[in-house]
């Protein structure tokens, strides 16, 4: 099974144009083994088939890297560590914070960071609206946290001036975009193709309206 997972991961990463290197692949496979162990108790993912974890979790997370700006990243509602841990593994130069208010999920995330030796990752166990670090983040990502309006309202203040909110969505969220809070504006919607996954994926980029009006990047 491990050999098949590695081959699937290596093939998918190559299709995405990512060079993970042997160490990166080893770390991602080790992360899946850790997820499998903890999932039996804490139900971190509803998907039970490990081969689907590569497409639905790892490659789904890795596919957004090419579209992200540089800088410190916050993964809001990280849960089982997606997309934050795959990003931290693939981009060891990027500082990543994994945020989840659930104590059990926080314990798993801390164990994963420790066992994988991710010196560039840290875990915060608190609600998004309470997480106000200094300095703030250049990129704030959400995979399954909430709709766009709540994401912008609750997690938006964690973004630095000129920072961006990036929401991972399935189908194009036209209705959610129409309900954006007045202080936020749509940047772009990027369609994604996930190797081995026959499903629609989009990235939605949000910017502070005040910052956009002021000429921020």
Image: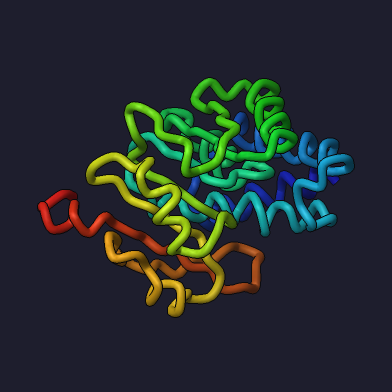
Spot the residue most to the right: 40
Of residues 23 and 107, the one nearer the viewer is 107
Residue shown at 62% from the left, 39% from the top:
101
Residue shown at 34% from the left, 36% from the top:
71
- Residue 164 visible in the current orientation: yes
Q: Position of residue 47 (x, y in %)?
A: 79, 57
Q: Position of residue 136 (x, y in %)?
A: 34, 34
Of residues 213 and 164, the one nearer the viewer is 213
Residue shown at 26% from the left, 55% from the top:
208
| Residue 213 location, quadrant | bottom left
Q: In this image, 25 relative to 50: left or right?
A: left
Total marks placed = 0
Coloring scheme of the render?
Answer: rainbow
- Residue 26 visible in the current orientation: no
Q: Position of residue 29 (x, y in %)?
A: 72, 38
Q: In this image, 69 relative to 194: left or right?
A: left
Residue shown at 84% from the left, 55% from the top:
48
Look at the picture and state if 204 lies above or below 23. Answer: below
Look at the picture and state if 32 lies above or below 151. Answer: above
Of residues 180 and 122, the one nearer the viewer is 180
Q: In this image, 210 relative to 130: left or right?
A: left
| Residue 163 location, quadrant | top left
């Amino acid at each position: 099974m491990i050999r098949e997972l590695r081959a699937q991961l290596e093939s998918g990463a190559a299709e995405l144009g990512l060079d993970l290197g042997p160490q990166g692949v080893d770390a991602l496979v080790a992360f899946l083994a850790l997820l499998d162990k903890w999932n039996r108790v804490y139900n971190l993912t509803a998907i039970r088939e490990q081969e689907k974890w590569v497409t639905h979790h790892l490659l789904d997370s890795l596919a957004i890297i090419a579209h992200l700006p540089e800088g410190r990243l916050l993964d809001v509602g990280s849960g089982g560590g997606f997309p934050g841990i795959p990003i931290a593994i693939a981009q060891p130069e990027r500082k990543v914070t994994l945020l989840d208010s659930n104590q059990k999920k926080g314990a798993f995330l801390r164990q994963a960071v420790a066992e994988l030796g991710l010196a560039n990752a840290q875990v915060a166990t608190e609600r998004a609206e309470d997480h106000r670090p200094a300095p703030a983040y250049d990129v704030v990502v959400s995979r399954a946290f909430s709709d766009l309006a709540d994401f912008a309202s609750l997690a938006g203040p964690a973004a630095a001036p000129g920072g961006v909110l990036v929401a991972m969505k399935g189908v194009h969220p036209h209705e959610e975009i129409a309900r954006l809070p007045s202080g936020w504006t749509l940047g772009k919607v990027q369609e994604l193709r996930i190797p081995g996954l026959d499903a629609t994926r989009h990235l939605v980029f949000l910017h502070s309206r005040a910052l956009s009006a002021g000429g921020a990047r």
